[in-house]
Amino acid sequence: MADARVVRLAEVLVDHSTKVKKGEKVLIAGDAAAAPLIKEIYRKVLQRGAFPITQITLTEFPRIFYDEANDEQLENVEFSDMLYRYADVYIKIDADENKYGLSDIPPEKMQRRRKATKRLTEYLMAGGVRWVLTRYPTNAYAQDARMSLEQYEDFVYRATNVDYGEMRRSMAQAAELFNKAEKVRIVGKETDLTVDIAGRQAVLCSGEYNVPDGEFFFTPNHLLTEGAIYYDWPTSFGSREVQGIRILFRQGKIVEYSAEKGQDVLEEALNTDDGSRYLGELGIGMNFGIDRPTQDILFDEKIGGSVHLAVGRAYEEAGVGNDSAIHWDMVKNLKDGGEIYLDGKLVQKNGKWVF
């Protein structure tokens, strides 16, 4: 019998996140290691009277692709574009078995591919297809999270299989305070940063596009960011780990930066294009059931008592903003001495709301 937790997650993805309807074409894409979840999604899609299309990736495919692909192949996204435009719904399941399997791929190859796939991302973000992204627990994710696979499975399903309606209601009160503000000041260890959100409205995220979920975010006025921030939680970019990031903004632009580990990775990302040194997103973590970082941004950016800021591309659903081929979220822990001010008024201290 299938794991009841996997069945429940399939229901969340099909019925809550994408609301699959009879007659719709549903693209189910995922890594082969996620087979138990893919099978249950496939089953649910058929039960809803829709038409499943599967695109399954073997563990070795990404490595083979980057080892063998020439420039023309790196830049070709015609087949993916065709699938996206054919489908009504897109459900993506990541299940890495080696998160660092591409860590030694030449950066210029990764960058060329990112630039090619940018238009696919833009199509998704513009609402061309209803979509959702999730993770299936593997040993690779569990090792990064410093857990056994069994512990990690419990952690994942506690985070994903929740009441998203209640989550949305719990976020609305805090988000409304931000909607009325112009300046968000973030204070913490080696951090005093002001982000301008004047005229912007929060987008509440409660399981529609990401599972797990639990954040609200803004597209900031990206030319007005001022100050410094230090990220004490590790992150990764292009399968390469980066730790201890320090960034200084002046008139919106990153003018100084360093990393305790992965300086070359940070520099590569920030030199991607003209927009990669400006902010594309300010996000507020609201899932207090995710209580620790796991080096997986899909979970870490939702941690209650954290904020995340993305360098690069803005999501237009939150307003017109910065443009770039990258969107790299970096998570700031505020649970140990952090503060958030809205137009000078303290609203969060040590990761807890004080309004």
Image (cartoon, rainbow, N blue to C red):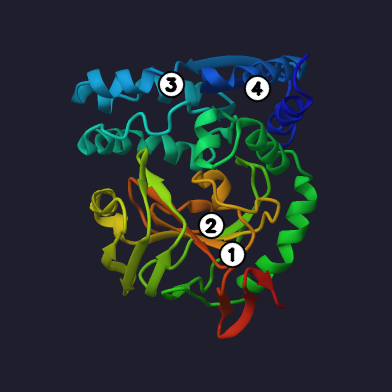
Q: Residue at x 48, y 52 (%)?
A: 316
Which circle marks residue 318 in the picture? 2
Determine the residue positioned at 59% across, 30% down.
137
Q: Amino acid at mark 3?
A: Met
State the image coordinates of residue 4 (x, y, percent, origin top left): 79, 25
- Label 4 crowd (10 A; few <14 / some 14-19 / many >=20): many
Q: Is residue 15 above or below residue 221?
A: above
Reading the image, the residue beneath label 1 is 201
Label 2: which secondary element: helix
Secondary element at image label 3:
helix
Label number found at residue 82: 3
- Residues at badges 1 and 2 in contact (C-beta under 8 Å)? yes
The answer to whether residue 282 is visible is no
Residue at the disc numbered 4? 37
Estimate the spatial distance between the alpha carbons at disc 1 and disc 3, rounded to whole Å.
33 Å
**Residue that extends furthest to the bottom in the rendered view of this protein:** 344
Helix, strand, or loop for circle 4? Answer: helix
Residue 44 screen position, x and y as percent: 73, 19
On screen, 304 above or below 210?
Answer: below
| Amino acid at pointer 1 | Gln
Q: In the rendered structure, which disc, 1 or 3, sits on the residue that comes first in sequence?
A: 3
In 3D space, how far apart are the residues under numbered discs 1 and 4 (Cα atoms)?
A: 35 Å
Distance CA(mark 2)–CA(mark 4): 31 Å
Judge left or right: residue 161 versus residue 325.
right
Quadrant placement of the N terminus:
top right
Q: Earlier in the sequence, mark 1 or mark 2?
A: 1
Earlier residue among tags 3 and 4: 4
Q: Is residue 353 left or right of residue 166?
A: left
Task: Tell which of 235 and 48 is nearer to you.
Answer: 235
Q: Looking at numbered disc 4 in the image, what kind of residue is underneath it?
A: Leu
Q: Which mark is residue 46?
A: none
What residue appears at the point 52 percent right and 17 percent down from the top-left corner?
32
